[in-house]
Image (cartoon, rainbow, N blue to C red):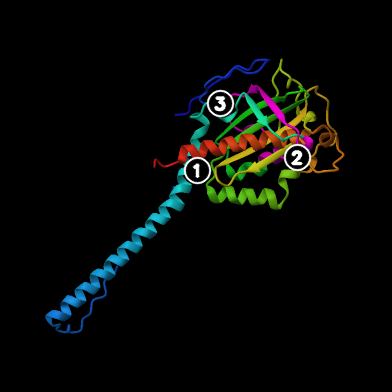
Amino acid sequence: METTVRLRVQAAVVARPRVTLAQPDTSDVDTARPRRFGARSRVVAAAACLVLGLGLIGGAAAGSWLTEESDGGTRDAYAVTGALWHSVPVDQLFPPTLHGPGAGPGGADRTWTRIAVAPDSGCKDAFDPLLSTALAPAGCLRLLRATYLDATRSHVTTVGLLFTRADAAAMRALHHRFKDEGLDRRTDLMPRPYAVPDTAAADFGDAQRASWAISVRTDAPVVVYTVSGFADGRPVSEPQPAAQARKTGATTAPAQAGLGHEAAGVADRIEARLKRTVTSATEKPS
């Protein structure tokens, strides 16, 4: 049963609530007259059959174990991950503070503070129509979002975890489509920010989107995305995907302001935490 949790969002850093993130014979019969074996021949034949039988059984068992480890392990990881949205504390997925040593322009250290956590939700109206259509093949189980503010209080970044209904094959297909068709670099497929009144992200709307990153995971049924912008609410006329805004020599406003590093830095750390959480939840006792 899904558990719905409503989080109170505060203007300052959100307190550390423990949140229940709200919610795969035939037998050959020889009809010819059988030969008569001597006693010794029967013993030898029986021994050979025993050895052969054990070998076949052992090989079948080994094959079964290998299949269980590979296929079963994947199914377990997907099943466990699909339940994380309502069984893991919010601080574990979206910690109050993120540290990014060397994550800024020129290798500068970065720190981000969580200022807002959205109530868990479905995906209706959460994405622009084209991005919603692109993600539709994976299905939407639950969407979790949080917004972070950098240490200079100049930049805001929303990060989202879209828990899908897809299996491993569907997630791989979606991953390859995003990469092969460049869907993660199209400005008409930018994620939407999560803005909250009376916070530094109060004016973080669609027009303020400056840089973004989208990662379709293949080890779990999750799409991780981020979108960054200026905390003062200024609109951005030329948004740029994080992968391009971080390149040496990039001259767009998002690149010059380091907003590509903001989007990529927050995404990398949230993805790393998600991976550790999934690994821990799927580990078999030693």
| Vertical position of residue 219 compared to residue 259: above or below | below
Q: Which contiguous range is marked in magenta?
A: 105-132
For the C terminus, the image quarter is top left
Amino acid on which disc 1 is placed: Tyr
For the N terminus, the image quarter is top left
Closer to the chain start, of discs 1 and 3, is: 1
The image quadrant that residue 242 belongs to is top right
Q: Is residue 75 rendered to the left or right of residue 43?
A: right
Asked if the magenta segment contains residue 112, the reply would be yes
Given residues 141 and 199, the one toward you in this image is 199
Amino acid on which disc 2 is placed: Ala
Identify the residue under disc 1. 78
Which residue is drawn at the image coordinates 75% and 25% (left, top)?
204
Q: Indicate the position of residue 213 as horizontal and vertical percent values.
A: 71, 39
**Are the residues tagged 1 and 2 within 8 Å (C-beta)?**
no
Question: Within 10 angstroms of label 3, few (less than 14), some, or many (20 or more) residues?
Answer: many
Question: Within 10 angstroms of label 1, few (less than 14), some, or many (20 or more) residues?
Answer: many
Identify the residue under disc 2. 242
Secondary structure beneath label 3: helix
Q: How many marks?
A: 3
Secondary structure beneath label 2: helix
Amino acid on which disc 3 is placed: Val
The CA distance from mark 1 to mark 3 is 20 Å
Identify the residue under disc 3. 90
Q: Indicate the position of residue 46 as horizontal and vertical percent values.
A: 19, 73
| Vertical position of residue 44 compared to residue 132: above or below | below
Q: Is residue 209 rendered to the left or right of residue 253?
A: left
